[in-house]
Image: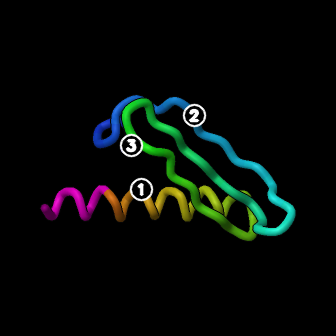
Amino acid sequence: MAIEHFGEVRFVGIKKHKKIGWVAKIQFDEFESLVAEGESAEDALRNLRKRLKKIIDRYNMV
C-alpha cells in the first residue's frame, strides 16, 4: 500500500516510549517519515495504517 504511493520503504519500526507509550514509525526513501502512537504495540501499528490510508485517500481526491 505505501510503496505504490510513497516509493520505497526504508524502515518500519516500533518502540516503547516512557512518556508517550508505543510509537510506530515508517521511513521512506523520497518522502518524510510518518509516526503514530498507541497504548499498545498493536494500537500504534493500527493507527499508523489508518494515517497512511487517510493520506492516500486525500491524495486520490486531488
Going from the N terminus, do you reach mark 3 or mark 1 first? 3
Quadrant containing the N terminus is top left
Going from the N terminus, do you reach mark 2 or mark 3 first? 3
| Residue 58 figure quarter | bottom left
Give the residue pinned by disc 1: 52
Amino acid type at mark 3: Ala
Q: Is residue 3 above or below residue 58?
A: above
Give the residue pinned by disc 2: 11
Query: What numbered label is drawn on residue 2?
Result: 3
Q: Residue at 29% of width from left, 42% of height from top?
A: 5
Residue numbers of the magenta segment: 56-62
> Magenta: predominant secondary structure element?
helix
Give the left or right position of residue 55, taking residue 40 as reference: left
Classify mark 2: helix, strand or loop.
Answer: strand
Q: Position of residue 51 (x, y in %)?
A: 45, 62
Q: Nearer the viewer, mark 2 or mark 3?
A: 2
